[in-house]
Image (tube, rainbow, N blue to C red):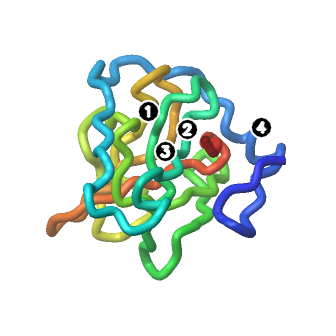
């Protein structure tokens, strides 16, 4: 059993729900991770912990990119096909490539359009990019599809 985000346990049930075929067509761009600031004050500033794609271990996001949307970091949703997803919200995910045109259909976050997000390394489904109708964005990443570095 993997442990991410303190008290959140990711168990086999979520691993089974997140077995998707690889998606094709994501951009070939590599992730650009920022170098630590010269005036970093703590070890977290110097060496951020990354979350990786569980399929290929490509860096997807940093733990310090976690954010809250509608007052929470973690959300559980069911899609129109009955699949349940536990997602975490992140302000940035350079290792996640959005696919397709944004849509408001069946959005889990009112006022946000969504696009499917896939790993830039292997094209595995990682979650969704959410774009606010009035500006701003975040990524809702399937926690069972991420592992800590």
Disc number placed over residue 118 in the picture, else none: 1
Q: Secondary structure at mark 2?
A: strand
Residue lying at 24% horizontally and 64% vertically, measured from the top left: 132
Q: Which residue is mark 2?
A: 52
Disc number placed over residue 16 in the picture, else none: 4
Q: Secondary structure at mark 3?
A: strand
Of 5 and 15, nearer the camera is 5
Q: Which residue is mark 3?
A: 127
Mark closer to the chain start, 3 or 2: 2
Query: Mark 4 Cα within 10 Å, few/some/many (few <14, many 20+)?
Result: few
Of 32 and 85, nearer the camera is 32
Query: Mark 3 Cα within 10 Å, few/some/many (few <14, many 20+)?
Result: many
Residue lying at 46% horizontally and 40% vertically, measured from the top left: 60
Check contact, mark 4 vs mark 3: CB within 8 A: no
Check contact, mark 3 vs mark 1: CB within 8 A: no
Across and down, in percent, residue 42 comes to: 45, 66
Of 9 and 17, nearer the camera is 9
Disc 1/disc 2 C-alpha distance (Å): 12 Å
């Amino acid at each position: 059993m993997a442990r991410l985000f303190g008290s959140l346990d990711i168990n086999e049930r979520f691993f089974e729900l997140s077995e998707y075929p690889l998606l094709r067509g994501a951009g070939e761009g590599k992730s650009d991770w920022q170098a630590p600031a010269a005036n970093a004050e703590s070890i977290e500033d110097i060496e951020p912990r990354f979350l990786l794609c569980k399929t290929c271990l490509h860096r997807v996001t940093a733990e310090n990119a976690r954010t809250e949307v509608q007052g929470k970091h973690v959300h559980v949703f069911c899609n129109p096909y009955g699949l349940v997803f536990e997602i975490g919200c992140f302000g940035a995910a350079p290792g996640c490539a959005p696919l397709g045109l944004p849509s408001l259909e069946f959005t889990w976050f009112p006022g946000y359009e969504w696009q499917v997000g896939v790993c830039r390394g292997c094209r595995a489904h990682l979650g969704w990019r959410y774009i606010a109708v009035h500006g701003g964005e975040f990524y809702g990443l399937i926690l069972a599809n991420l592992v800590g570095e």
